[in-house]
Image (cartoon, rainbow, N blue to C red):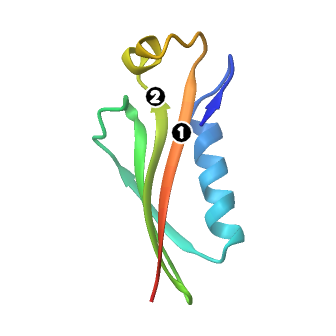
């Protein structure tokens, strides 16, 4: 999670891309319907590398979730699961 006044989708996409790239994964990003995130500002990601596969999601957390946790700034988040083959 990242929380600050200018947190946005572009920032979290850049973080996820960097993590997967630096670990040697090729990746594919697709639209996501994960309700934790703002519609249109979320994505699913799958990756492949010599050492295994990965799948996950990322995006801008919805205002409802931010309010429920009494946070004051936008929040971006990602989760990636790695599987060794």
Residue 49, percent across and down? 55, 83
Marked residue nearer the N-terminal end (2 or 1): 2
> On the image, numbered disc 1 is attached to which residue?
77
Q: Residues within 10 Å of mark 1 (few under 14, many from 20)?
A: many
| Residue 40 rendering spot, x and y as whole percentages | 37, 33
Given residues 82 and 9, the one toward you in this image is 82
Q: How many marks?
A: 2
Coordinates of residue 20 in the picture (x, y in percent): 61, 66
> What residue appears at the point 57 percent right and 20 percent down from the top-left corner?
74
Q: Is residue 50 left or right of residue 30?
A: right
In the rendered image, which quarter is residue 34 located in? top left
Numbered mark located on residue 59 in the image: none
85 left or right, relative to 1: left
**Residue 25 picture quarter:** bottom right
Q: Residue at x 56, y 33 (%)?
A: 76
The residue carrying mark 2 is 61
Judge by depth and name the residue closer to the eye, 76 or 40: 76
Label 1 sits on a secondary structure element that is strand
Q: Secondary structure at mark 2?
A: strand
> On the picture, is 28 further left or further right than 36?
right
Q: Where the C terminus falls, by quadrant?
A: bottom left
Q: Position of residue 33 (x, y in %)?
A: 27, 41
Above or below, comparing residue 72 to residue 57 in the picture: above
């Amino acid at each position: 999670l990242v929380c600050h006044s200018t947190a946005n989708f572009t920032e979290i996409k850049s973080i996820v891309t960097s993590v997967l790239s630096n670990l040697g994964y090729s990746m594919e990003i697709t639209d996501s319907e994960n309700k934790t995130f703002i519609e249109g500002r979320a994505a699913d990601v799958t990756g492949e590398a010599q050492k295994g596969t990965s799948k996950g999601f990322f995006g801008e957390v919805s205002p409802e979730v931010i309010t429920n946790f009494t946070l004051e700034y936008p929040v971006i988040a990602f989760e990636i699961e790695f599987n060794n083959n």
